[in-house]
Image (spheres, rainbow, N blue to C red):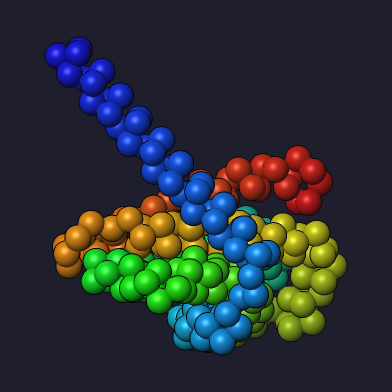
Amino acid sequence: MRHYIAENVGRRALSLAGKLGAAALMIKSILVWTFKARPEAREIVKQSMRIGVDSLSVTILTSFFTGMVLALQMGYTSKNLFNEPLYIGTMVAFSLVKELAPVLTSIVVAGRVGAAVTAEIGTMRVTEQIDALYTLGTNPTRYLLIPRYIAFMLTIPLLTVFADFLGIFGGFLVSNIKFNVPSSVYWNDIFTFMEIKNFMHGFLKTFAFAFMIATVSCYKGLTCEEGAEGVGKATTQAVVLSMVLVMVLDYFISALLVAVGII
């Protein structure tokens, strides 16, 4: 029994090491070709529209109602504690800007676009379209991966900025209508306590999230098994892994930013 467990653990460890090595080689290839050859500008614009513009509506809805529910909960909590809805704007803004907007936006994009990228690249792999690109003299890394990486890195931070503003505005509507907090008080609370470093705390995270989602989506697509079932499994694994890694990275990046003073 012990021998079986040790063998199983060893096999899984070797498999994980092999996957991490393959992903590292893929990242190395992307970095090399990014500086070695001119990126496909038309493909970058196409992928940016697909990732950013097409995800804008669901990002806005998610952040808007998140800001509303934050204001609702914090308003009732402060009324129970202090008999007045105090500092709703401050609490909503800090919660969204530093944590919720970057994380929720990344999760939404991972579920909506990460799955599509994995399925698209995976389908190209199992139907040997990637091999055909090699035959035609086109580098798949330059044509397929780099535009998607750049599009993720450009659009997720911008979507997060939209999410920040819309979430804070949603909180304003609830605080003003539900708790009769004057608009001047709500916005003054935010501008009094919010600093640029608080915004940068959440904004900087989005670049790491974008790079991670692009890596997982592209790698799972390139390494999916043959057949429709393999593409489906790769897509599911990419979405689940991306969401989990967003949470994991969020903690470690937050700890790092706090340690260097960007709080």
Query: Left or right: 43 with respect to 200?
Result: left
**Which residue shows up at 81% across the image and 46% down it?**
261
Count the marks.
Answer: 0
Q: Against 148, is 245 above or below?
A: above
Q: Against 17, is 263 above or below?
A: below
Could you tell me residue 257's position as x and y percent? 73, 47
Please say whether residue 3 is visible from this viewpoint: yes
**Which residue shows up at 19% across the image and 13% down it?**
3
Could you tell me residue 120's position as x and y percent? 34, 73
**Which residue shows up at 19% across the image and 60% down it?**
226
Q: Against 108, is 46 above or below?
A: below
Question: Could you say which quadrant of the image residue 229 lies in?
Answer: bottom left
Could you tell me residue 114's position as x and y percent? 41, 68
Q: Nearer the viewer, residue 42 or 261?
A: 42
Question: Could you say which quadrant of the image residue 188 lies in?
Answer: bottom right
Query: Left or right: 113 with respect to 154?
Result: left
Q: Nearer the viewer, residue 28 or 46?
A: 28
Q: Which quarter of the image is occupied by the N terminus?
A: top left
Could you tell me residue 207's position as x and y percent? 63, 62
Q: Nearer the viewer, residue 242 or 20?
A: 20
**Which residue shows up at 56% across the image and 60% down it?**
30
